[in-house]
Amino acid sequence: MAGPVTLRGERVVLREATEADVPRIVEILTIPEVAQWWPRETEDGMRAQLTEDQMTTWTILDGDDVVGVVQAWEETEPDYRHAGIDLALHPDWHGRGLGTDTVRTVARHLFADRGHHRATIDPAAHNERAIRTYERVGFRPVGVMRRYERGADGTWHDGLLMDMLPEDLR
């Protein structure tokens, strides 16, 4: 993706993550309520993600507090060009609309600034909180991906593929 980008939502500021953010991001990702959806995250793994060409990682800021992380990746093959989003929010900030604002802000950026015609997101099929958040923004269920990812418990879990077109964004 292009150089450092800061995005502003209604309530959140998304600042492109740096090496200095890695300990806080991993701290959030290893909280049990978050780690069930983001298992086995490490500082080394997060550092590697910060340097991936096709991905951008932002810290989610509520005021000066880093309260989560959001990532966008881009498929650049012209015949399949689209983008995807991943989100993790500290449980102490759940229920405040920050996740919805974050996803909406990133989706708007991917459509308006990056020129994508479709965005995807793929929560665990049993992650009801995330699915409700994504539906509020305009994502629609496309299908269940059976045994899509290995969960924190070591067993395979289904994922829900959701997508959104620019005209679906709310």
Image (cartoon, grey):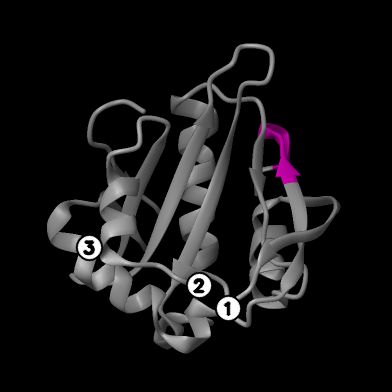
Left/right of residue 50 with respect to residue 165 in the rendered view: left
Kind of residue at badge 3: Val
| Farthest-out residue, left | 20
Q: Is residue 108 above or below residue 112?
A: below
Q: Which residue is mark 2?
A: 39
Q: Position of residue 130 (x, y in %)?
A: 64, 69
Q: Which residues are magenta?
A: 163-168
Q: Which residue is mark 3?
A: 22
Crowding at label 3, few (<14), some or many (≥20) Cα neighbours within 10 Å?
some
Quarter of the image where one finds residue 149:
bottom right
Name the residue: 41% across, 87% down: 92
Taking the image as drawn, is residue 10 in sight?
no
N-term mark: 3 or 1 = 3
Q: Which residue is mark 1?
A: 152
Name the residue: 55% across, 63% down: 100
N-term mark: 3 or 2 = 3
